[in-house]
Structure formats: structure tokens, C-alpha cells
Image: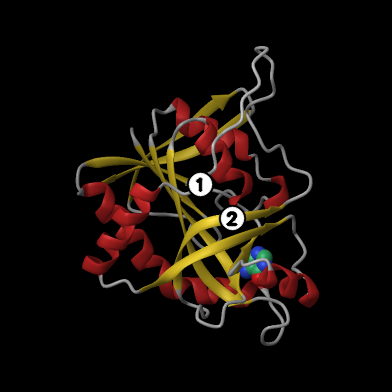
Amino acid sequence: MEKAIIGGTGVYEIGQKVSKKLIETKYGEVEIDVVTIEGEEIVFLPRHGKSHAVPPHLVNYRANIMALKQMGVKYVYATAAVGSFNENYEPGDVVVLKDFLDFTKSRPLTFFEGEDGVVRHVDMSDPYCSNLRAKFYNAAKKEGLLIKGDAVYVCTEGPRFETAQEIRMYKNLGADVVGMTNIPEVILAKELGMCYAAVGIVSNWATGMKGSITLHEIKDTLELSKEKVIKTFIRVFLE
Ligand code: HPA
């Protein structure tokens, strides 16, 4: 199975579930769904578990990505709920992640631990596969999904939300949206040679932009856009 979708907050199921698989990896066990869409088998992995039980800083990212690799996955689309501090990207909008700033603090960030005596540095000049990004833009047009644009994503450690001053800093550094999960996911996928792209679904204004944030509000807003995003992923995979 070469294609996978990683579902972020609010995206816990897609398509017609065919089977559940428990994948054993060096980093732990991962439960994934195999779904069939128009005869094509696609791997689906809900990042936080089915009931959003694992907080962002404790997600076993290495096990998740290794499980996909072991299944033969080469292409990954992920969704990420994001807060926006770019006035042009409003709650409900969909953006395509183009680059990132890593402000995480305590997560295992790599598969490259030097055990085999080799030091490796993965290239990050195109962190989100430009091929998959272009395909997503094309498919979105056909699916009637409006993509607001590309976004620079800042990943915070969480699980707390950011302060208003932190958001001002991230804005000054050139970022557009904030989330807690795309690092190290995108890095690990790259280390294993997979093409990985991620779509940000804006669920709220970031701290200090307009009002305060609740998870409840985030989940409600995501409902509005997620169906079309998933349909667009599937269209890319089927073409
Ligand atoms: N901050 C961090 N992570 C998030 C946010 C946010 O405002 N919204 C959704 N995920």
C-alpha cells in the first residue's frame, strides 16, 4: 500500500474501513485502518488515536511514521488543525503548508541516532513535497475546494496554547499559522524518503488575534472544511 492519510484533530475516519491492522515497530505498536476507496487501498492513521486521547507532545511520531514505512507507504497527506495569525487566513480556510519553524522542545526528532556509526543530516530545502503540493492544488480545483494559499507553519510544544507575545514573535519571523503536531512528523517522513505534504485547516484565530480559544470551537470549525479536504486527498490518490 503506497498511499496514506494521516488525520489530525477532527479527522478520525475516512472512507470504507476494510480492516484494522496492528503494526509492530521498533518504537511501539500502531493501530492503522486500511480503507478502500474506488477499489484502491489507502492507509489511514488518526494521529492522536481514535478518540483524540494522545496529546500532541506525547504522540509517538516515530512509531507512526515507521509503521507507514513498514506497510510500504511512499506518499503521505496529512491534515493539521492550525491557529492563524495571518489576516488572510480565517477560521474554516484551508492552506497548504510550505515551510516550517520548529519551536518544539522535548520530542524525539529523528530516526538518525547514529547507531550504525553513520551521521546523517536530512535535506530540508523542500520539506513538504512540492510534487504532492501541486497535485493537491490541482485536485482541489476539480473538487471545488478553495485553497487560500501556502503557509509557513510554526510548531509549538503545547499542550498549552501560545501567549499573545509569542504569536507576535512568530508573525515577525514570517510564519502564518501555528499548530502542535507537524514536527517531527514531516521530518521523520523525509528521513525515511517518503513524499509528505500537509494541509492546514484553520480552526481558530491564534491567541491575541480575536478572543480566546477552546478545543470545542476548534472541533466545530474543522467540521466545515474537513470533508472536502479528504475528498481532495482521495482524488489525488485516484488520479
Ligand atoms: N495553537 C496551537 N495549536 C493549534 C491551534 C493554536 O491556536 N489551533 C489548532 N491547533
Q: How is the image coloured?
A: secondary structure
Q: Is residue 148 above or below residue 35?
A: below
3D distance between C-alphas at marks 1 and 2: 8 Å
**Mark before the other along the chain sequence, 1 or 2:** 2
User: Residue at image x 76%, y 69%?
Assistant: 162
Q: Residue at x 51, y 31 (%)?
A: 67
- Residue under circle 1? 127
Please identify the quadrant where the N terminus is shown: top left
Based on the displayed image, in which of its 4 quarters is residue 174 positioned?
bottom right
Quadrant for ligand 1?
Answer: bottom right
Q: Position of residue 115 (x, y in %)?
A: 69, 15
Query: Picture coordinates of residue 11 (x, y %)?
Result: 48, 59
Residue, far bottom = 210
Q: Position of residue 112 (x, y in %)?
A: 64, 26
Secondary structure type for disc 2: strand
Q: Is residue 154 above or below residue 132?
A: below
- Name the amino acid type tagged 1: Pro
Amino acid beneath label 2: Phe
- Residue 215: numbered disc: none
Q: Residue at x 59, y 30 (%)?
A: 29
Observer able to see residue 55: no
State the image quarter where residue 186 is shown: top right
Asked if residue 171 shows in the view, the reply is yes
Disc 1 vs disc 2: Cβ atoms closer than 8 Å?
yes
93 to 131, vertically: above or below: below
Left or right of 174? Residue 146 is left
- Residue under label 2, please give it: 100
- Quick check: 50 left or right of 107? left
